[in-house]
Amino acid sequence: DSGVTQTPKHLITATGQRVTLRCSPRSGDLSVYWYQQSLDQGLQFLIQYYNGEERAKGNILERFSAQQFPDLHSELNLSSLELGDSALYFCASSVRGDETQYFGPGTRLLVL
Amino acid sequence: GESVGLHLPTLSVQEGDNSIINCAYSNSASDYFIWYKQESGKGPQFIIDIRSNMDKRQGQRVTVLLNKTVKHLSLQIAATQPGDSAVYFCADGGSNYKLTFGKGTLLTVNP
């Protein structure tokens, strides 16, 4: 158990819908990262937050957005969902953002 | 752009043997590399990391070797056990700790 929690574990929705994925970092970690894992693209970095502010952006679509709240939990919002958005979404956290990242168990999203 | 690749998509070993998983990276400015293990249905689990000022680092039953000249790193697992069966990813932290993952190697340990 890494100490990073994610909810929900599974999510099934329809195309065009919007969902919110939630992540709580390890106690004491200030930085949160979001990754998408699909069979064809592998693990792809989406976005990083540090102490409430966006720090780095990766291959995140404009339909996707994230934020980190004052209590340091983070949410990833996925809108206008397409079939191709079906994937595992992982959250990771680290203390400051320049060291080892610890991953949560992931949210499996299925868009029908 | 940056890329991290793996030489072998699958590796099958006998229990008790040593396993070696290889990884190539392309970003010569990268100064941080990590190996993760991912079991079915779980998130990536940190195994070991290495910084570019080192060429070898050892953990419990695992050793990571870094060859900056050829931009290659490897993960060695000693006395491989059935519980080691998983997908192993190398990740390149670049120069800003934004991880770029390889495609992964599936390690299967035969009893």
Image: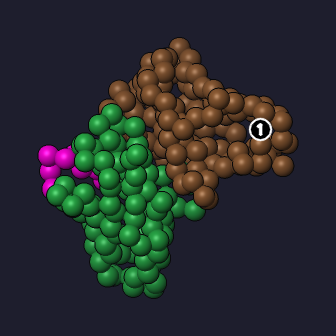
Chain colours: A brown, B green
Residue B34 seen in the current view: no
Which residue is labeled 1 in the image? A81
| Residue, far top | A70
Whether B101 is among the magenta residues is: no
Whether B55 is among the magenta residues is: yes
- Secondary structure at numbered mark 1: loop
Q: Residue at x 63, y 34 (%)?
A: A61
Q: Residue at x 45, y 34 (%)?
A: A93
Provide residue B6's location: percent of width, then percent of height: 40, 65
Q: Residue at x 28, y 68 (%)?
A: B76
**Is residue A64 shown above or below A37?**
above
Which image quadrant for residue B81?
Answer: bottom left
| Residue, far front | B1
The stretch of residues the image draws in magenta is B48-59
**Foreground of the two, B76 or B71:** B71
Which image quadrant for residue B77?
Answer: bottom left
Provide residue A96's location: percent of width, then percent of height: 35, 27
Provide residue A101's location: percent of width, then percent of height: 40, 40
Q: Chain of mark 1?
A: A
Residue A108 seen in the current view: yes
**Is residue B1 shown above or below B7?**
above
**Number of numbered discs overlaid on the protein picture:** 1
Q: Residue at x 49, y 17 (%)?
A: A52
**Is residue A68 shown above or below B35?**
above
Tell me the crowding category of disc 1: few under 14, some 14 to 19, or many 20 or more residues within 10 angstroms, Cα based: many
Q: Amino acid at mark 1?
A: Leu
**Foreground of the two, B81 or A83:** A83
On the picture, is A62 further left or further right than B107? right
Provide residue B14's location: percent of width, then percent of height: 39, 85
